[in-house]
Amino acid sequence: MTVEPGVRVGQDSDASVIERSWDEPEEFAALFDRHADSVHRYAARRLGGEAAEDVMAETFTTAFQQRFRYRTEASDARPWLFGIATNLIGRHRRAEARRLKTLARLPATAPGTPAEETVADRVAARVSAQAVGGELAGALARLPARHRDVLLLVAWADLGYEEVAAALGVPVGTVRSRLHRARRKLREALGGSDPTALREESDDE
Amino acid sequence: MNEIELLREWDADAPPLSDTARARARFRLQQAMGATAAPVGVAGVGRRPLLRIAVAGVAAAAVTATVVVTQDTGTEPRTRTVSATTVLRGAAAEALRTEKPVAPRDDQFIYTKEVIEETPVSGGPAKTYVDESWNSVDGSKKSYVSELGHKQWVPPFQKGQSTWPPSRWSELKQLPTDPAKLTATLRDMGGRPDYGRPTKADEWPMVQYFLSGLLRNAVLPKGLRSAAFEALASVPGVTVLPGRTEVDGRAAIAIRYVGPSGTPWQGSGRMLLFDAKSYQYLGTRESRKAGGKTYEQWSHLTAQAVVDRVFQRP
């Protein structure tokens, strides 16, 4: 038995689970049990349910195959897993764009929203985020993919700047500048720009 | 509210992870791991990461093998031929005959006492572990689990976590006790089972996986264990281990699953052991590797019961 006596389930780090899985592959299943839901949720928000199941499953099989490359000084495996997931989501870029465009065309879901109310009014009034989902989707669709990855790893995967940098294998400064640009575009979109003008910008830093 | 907070709150029409999708994804991982630990609780309840279902990389055609069985009266071993189907059907009848009806409530615990005898393959003294565990019936309470003497509290399931087999008694009760229907239900899980459709070759490993998981439950609704043994009898690749098998000094018949060649179903060989005469289910034999050594394990349940509290014994 590789688990030390007295160690409670859930208290050992992801890194030690991965390290154990080097000798005992079955140990890796614990990582799935811990993170399957959050990886799936991240993928489902980006790609919808069907593709998300596939991306989630492939994230863990890919991670398993790459487990010998894991740097065990990083105790939390989430940046690594979300990095793999983001990479896999990148293969579905067209599907993601289609989905965002569809979401952008959906009417606001907040009941009783007067038609003449502007997006800015609704944001200012702190209505539910679901009500401005269309605008959010439109803005996300217009972001360069690399900026979108950073923004959504922060917002949906709940990673910090350093963790996003580790997930994407880029310097932290790059994460900051991409996030800054992405947030500015989002603010503009919520401030009333036309969310139906969907065009992906050039993928610059 | 800033734009990041808005994004965080927006669900983007994302559907939650369903139990079926989780089971499928976990199954894919299990296949990638090249070993199939028995399907276990997501929260770690009943987790035995060291267990493997076994498969030699041979074709799965032969369901008959020659087994040497020692008779009680004579000293000469007698040879006879027995098929996995015969053994499993016998086990099904035996389960039906001997099982006592139970109906645990969701707030109760399943008590199990399992004895595991572990022998190093390279030689050395055998070691015996007695594992007593109390598993929350519906996973809503803390469970106390012992695995090879390593005891630990297992936290309640978090929201959205689930297990195969289902832990809720009400869900187990919904599984059909007709073997063919049980197979179709497990095969078509997530949708409406098509009882009339034959099972395809690539669907059998999954069916076998779910059936083995079901059989690991110490307590099942009346008729379900029998149905699972019967259903297992129909799975291609379930074979009798040739040669003589013995546990605790009594003659036994070992059944194992041999998956299709060229698939990741390879391992050291988890076997179900049955009494050579009555076909009563006895326990499992398998090997595990740890610290560069290989151990042979013989595990069997010596007690199971429904109790109200952790540490309460029947």
Image (tube, rainbow, N blue to C red):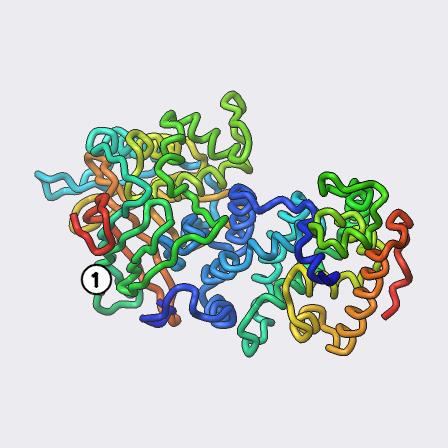
Vertical relation: B243 (above or below) A173? above
Vertical relation: B135 (above or below) A24? above
Picture quarter with the C terminus of chain A: bottom right
The residue at the point 47 percent across, 30 percent down is B185
Q: Residues within 10 Å of mark 1 (few under 14, many from 20)?
A: some
Compared across the picture, whether B258 is left or right of B98 comes to: right
Compared across the picture, whether A92 is left or right of B267 comes to: right
Q: Nearer the viewer, residue B178 or B31?
A: B178
Percent x, y of residue A147: 80, 64
Q: Nearer the viewer, residue A126 or B225?
A: A126
The residue at the point 36 percent across, 27 percent down is B177
Percent x, y of residue B295: 32, 63
Q: Chain of mark 1?
A: B
Label 1 sits on what residue type? Thr
Residue topped by disc 1: B128
Residue B242 in view here: no
The residue at the point 84 percent across, 57 percent down is A191
In the displayed image of the protein, which residue is found farthest to the top? Answer: B196
Helix or strand or loop: what does disc 1 sit on?
A: strand
Q: How many dots with numbers? A: 1
Percent x, y of residue B61: 45, 36
